[in-house]
Image: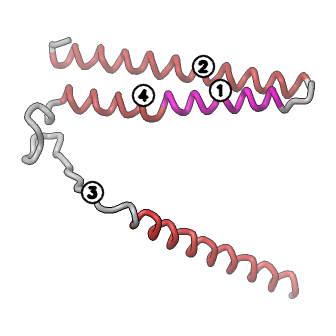
Amino acid sequence: MDIMMEIAKKGRAVWVSAIVFFAGMGVAFAQGGTQAITLCDPLGGSGCTPGSETFATVATNIANFLFVDIAIPLSVIMVLVGAFQMMTSAGEPEKISQGKKTILYAAIGLAIAIVAGGITTLLKSIITGSS
């Protein structure tokens, strides 16, 4: 019975911590001021700049987001993680090998992202008939 009470107390502590954390996040983000956000309909709705509702523009925006905002920073972080694994290996061959694999897989992932960006550009030029 004592074990059940301890688990229940820990569970309540986790919930209270989560609520305090998310409430604090709202306060922290609320202090940054307000910015007007304009959402455009990529399918041709009003309120967008001319030319922003075409398929080519939407495909380019998505590819740029995936490559520039996600793939490049993630691969840099993974290279740093691999380097950290190698530095903290204390000479153990298995940990050094794991660090090398992490760096290799980060490079392979970046290469795949670059090829995917090229394929997106190729498909866009085929579909729209422009370069």
On residue 107, which mark appears?
A: 2
Start-end of magenta stretch: 71-87
88 lies above or below 16: above
Kind of residue at disc 4:
Phe
Q: Are marks 1 and 2 in contact (CB under 8 Å)?
A: yes
On residue 35, which mark appears?
A: 3
Question: Is 122 covered by the magenta stretch?
Answer: no
On residue 48, which mark appears?
A: none
Distance, label 3 to label 2, CA atoms, is: 37 Å
The residue at 20%/26% (across/down) is 56
Q: Nearer the viewer's eye, disc 3 or disc 1?
A: 3
Figure quadrant of residue 88: top right
Q: Earlier in the sequence, mark 4 or mark 2?
A: 4
In the visual, does 46 lie left or right of 21?
A: left
Q: Quadrant of the C terminus?
A: top left
Q: Nearer the viewer's eye, disc 3 or disc 2?
A: 3
Indicate the position of residue 105 as horizontal and vertical percent values: 64, 23
Indicate the position of residue 74 as horizontal and vertical percent values: 55, 33
Q: Which residue is mark 1?
A: 79
Distance, label 4 to label 3, CA atoms, is: 26 Å
Indicate the position of residue 67 as horizontal and vertical percent values: 42, 28
Distance, label 4 to label 2, CA atoms, is: 14 Å
- Residue lying furthest right in this view? 91
Q: Which residue is mark 4?
A: 67
Q: Earlier in the sequence, mark 4 or mark 3?
A: 3
Q: Quadrant of the N terminus?
A: bottom right
The residue at 33%/62% (across/down) is 33
Q: Earlier in the sequence, mark 4 or mark 1?
A: 4
Distance, label 3 to label 1, CA atoms, is: 35 Å
Kind of residue at disc 1:
Val
Q: Secondary structure at mark 3?
A: loop
